[in-house]
């Protein structure tokens, strides 16, 4: 049996503008997903997906003939998980015809070690694992399936913090050190909700080219400052500046002003605003603030970041 593993992801800076070339800071997480491949004599692919509690959340069998079909071009986010997986496998097959032709069949198991609702990259870790199995370019597979900036693929492949930049449709990934001396006062809180960001994205797209370039430059500069700041106070100021910029360009209130106005520390949205995790600052009392408000998934920085 062969095992592949990919890391989950958190986008610390550059949400939205990462798509247009802003230099962004991404953290691979200790949580991820593995994919186990076992060759069998039964023609086809038996696929079994386990969640973080070792419960099966998807079990399906694909005939090899189904995978020889040309992948249809459609949004994978609007179809069933089974159909979505089939299209990923079809796309992978189109990039490497030999793998399925040279084997009778496979027994595949996947194992998540984080809850699916956390938003740490159920899809990106799957894409990267399948790409490793097929020995193909994970960015190309992403392009043929879910699309996106690709920062999550970069995080899946690295075991340390990275900066990520899209330049002329190419990915520039740099290993960086993000190990702040105040890391014991950083933690992540899961908001346990999803939000339709269509209006936010539309408002973002309505920016003029000059506005967009100005904001990309600002966020890229902030990313550099996030990496070099030496005090929690400075870090909190950078969070406030970053939140103000993104709030304006997506026409969406900051999460702190919406939900946590009386919180003493700083709060930063991560990735798509309105759901999944936020980054917060403060000591143990700060974590109690969120617990008292019913937010019980609280993970210290040192337990989340690789």
Image (cartoon, rainbow, N blue to C red):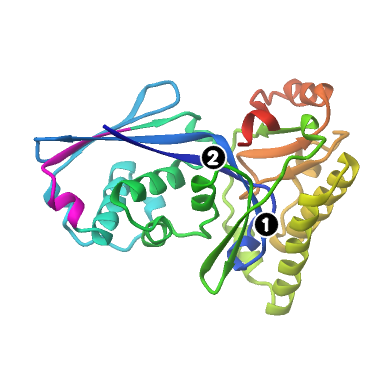
| Labels 1, 2: front one | 1
Residue 15 is drawn in which quadrant?
bottom right
Q: Residue at x 62, y 61 (%)?
A: 18
Q: Mark 1 = which residue?
A: 14
Q: Mark 2 = which residue?
A: 119
246 or 154, nearer to the observer: 154
Residue 103, image x, y percentages = 13, 45
In the image, taking residue 241 as reference, residue 71 lies left or right, namely left
118 or 45, nearer to the observer: 45
Q: Residue at x 71, y 44 (%)?
A: 178
Label 1: few (<14), some (14–19) or many (≥20) C-alpha neighbours in 10 Å: many
Magenta residues? 98-109
224 or 218, nearer to the observer: 224
Q: Residue at x 62, y 67 (%)?
A: 21
- Note whether residue 192 is visible: yes
- Note whether residue 79 is visible: no
107 or 83, nearer to the observer: 107
Residue 146, image x, y percentages = 42, 56
């Amino acid at each position: 049996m062969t095992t592949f593993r990919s890391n989950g992801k958190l986008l610390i800076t550059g949400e939205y503008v990462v798509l247009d070339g802003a230099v962004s800071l991404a953290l691979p997480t200790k949580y991820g997903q593995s994919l186990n491949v076992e060759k069998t004599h039964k023609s086809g692919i038996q696929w079994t997906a386990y969640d973080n509690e070792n419960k099966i959340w998807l079990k399906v069998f694909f005939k090899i003939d189904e995978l020889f079909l040309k992948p249809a071009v459609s949004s994978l986010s609007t179809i069933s998980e089974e159909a979505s997986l089939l299209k990923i496998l079809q796309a992978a097959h189109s990039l490497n015809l030999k793998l399925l032709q040279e084997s009778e069949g496979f027994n595949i198991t996947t194992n998540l070690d984080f809850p699916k609702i956390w938003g740490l990259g159920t899809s990106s870790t799957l894409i990267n694992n399948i790409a490793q199995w097929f020995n193909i370019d994970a960015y190309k597979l992403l392009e043929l399936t879910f699309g996106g900036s690709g920062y999550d693929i970069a995080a899946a492949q690295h075991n340390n913090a990275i900066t990520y930049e899209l330049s002329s449709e190419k990915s520039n990934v740099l290993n960086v050190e993000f190990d702040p001396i105040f890391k014991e006062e950083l933690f992540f809180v899961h908001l346990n909700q999803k939000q339709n960001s269509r209006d936010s994205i539309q408002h973002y797209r309505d920016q003029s080219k000059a506005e967009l370039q100005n904001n990309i430059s600002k966020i890229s500069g902030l990313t550099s400052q996030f990496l070099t700041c030496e005090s929690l106070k400075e870090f909190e100021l950078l969070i406030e500046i970053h939140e103000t910029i993104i709030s304006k360009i997506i026409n969406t209130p900051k999460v702190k002003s919406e939900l946590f106005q009386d919180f003493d520390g700083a709060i930063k949205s991560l990735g798509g605003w309105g759901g999944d995790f936020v980054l917060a600052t403060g000591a143990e009392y700060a974590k109690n603030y969120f617990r008292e408000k019913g937010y019980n998934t609280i993970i210290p920085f040192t337990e989340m970041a690789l």
